[in-house]
Image: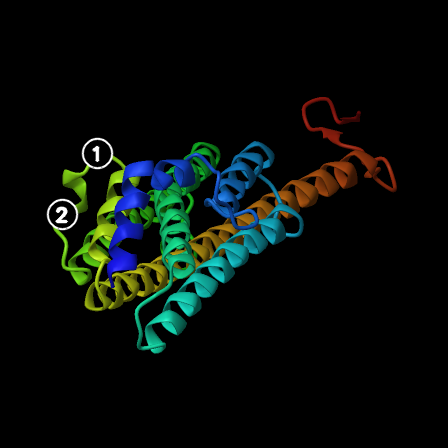
Amino acid sequence: MKKIKVFIMTLLLVGISVNVSAGIIKRGKGGGGDLKRIVTILAAMQAKQALMATDLGKELNEAIQQTQNQLKQIEMEMTNMMDLGQELTTGQLMKIQQDYQELMNIQNQFKDTISSFKNFEQSFKDTYADFKNLEGLSPEEYMRKADDLLAATKDITKSSFAIAGLGDPERLANDSQRIAELMRAANTAEGQKAVLQAGVNMAAEQTKALLELRTLIASSLKTQNAEEMRRIQNEKAELEHKKAVMRYKPSKKYEKLDLINGMKW
């Protein structure tokens, strides 16, 4: 127990939490990198604005799936540590800190990702002002759903801090301070369990939010592509009709009677 407390104080004084946020301790891509990819892909889709599901849509799903996999790994790691039923080692405490940094980074990326999705919807709205899908959803309603999702994600950190027995995380200036407070709470076996449970909750809630975001984007892409296909088919049909009219030639010349003079003309 004494060794754990000494480690926690050293961790806070030396400022490893700051080093983590600066990227010294890393796990693969981590750091919400896949969510940043989503922002980039949505921007590319906004520029392309047509039939993007086969290439960019596939890449988008892959980025979301990779972030979900990352969260599942963190959730599993923290669950396994809880199941040990003993005080954690220095290495395990450092792992918890690393996991929390990744969770915070993902949390911060939700805002940019949803903002990018709304820009994507706005671009579609500007092109098809009166569009509604078969369920009656307009681009404005997709954007409203995105706002609702963003509002829900804002409570994730707050509820996780409550599980750890801590106050409102918004009273702290930044993520480094939030992580430092979580690590201070982990200076006892009971505190460690609470901090781990909070991390499991945070990862699970973020996974749920990502699933909702994935469903929202998939629905939007499906309806936008359907509308684009309908427009292309209508334009093609109109072009074919014009070509047919231009090719049409009467089989014989009709004569009209001049009823006044009794002549044909």
Q: Quadrant of residue 95?
A: bottom left
Q: Residue at x 17, y 41 (%)?
A: 170
Query: Which colour assignment does the render follow?
Result: rainbow
Q: Which image quadrant: the C terminus?
A: top right
The local secondary structure at tag 2 comes to loop
Q: Relative to the observer, which residue lies in front, 63 or 6?
A: 6
Judge whether residue 220 can be spotted in this image. yes
- 11 lies left or right of 36: left
The image's mark for residue 168 is 2
Whether 8 is drawn above or below 257: the answer is: below
- 236 lies left or right of 163: right
**Residue placed farthest to the front in the image?**
2
Mark 1 Cα-neighbour bin, 10 Å: few <14, some 14–19, many ≥20? few
Query: Where is mark 1, residue-wise?
Result: 173
Whether 219 is drawn above or below 17: the answer is: below
Q: Kindly identify the amino acid type of the residue bearing the numbered disc 2.
A: Asp
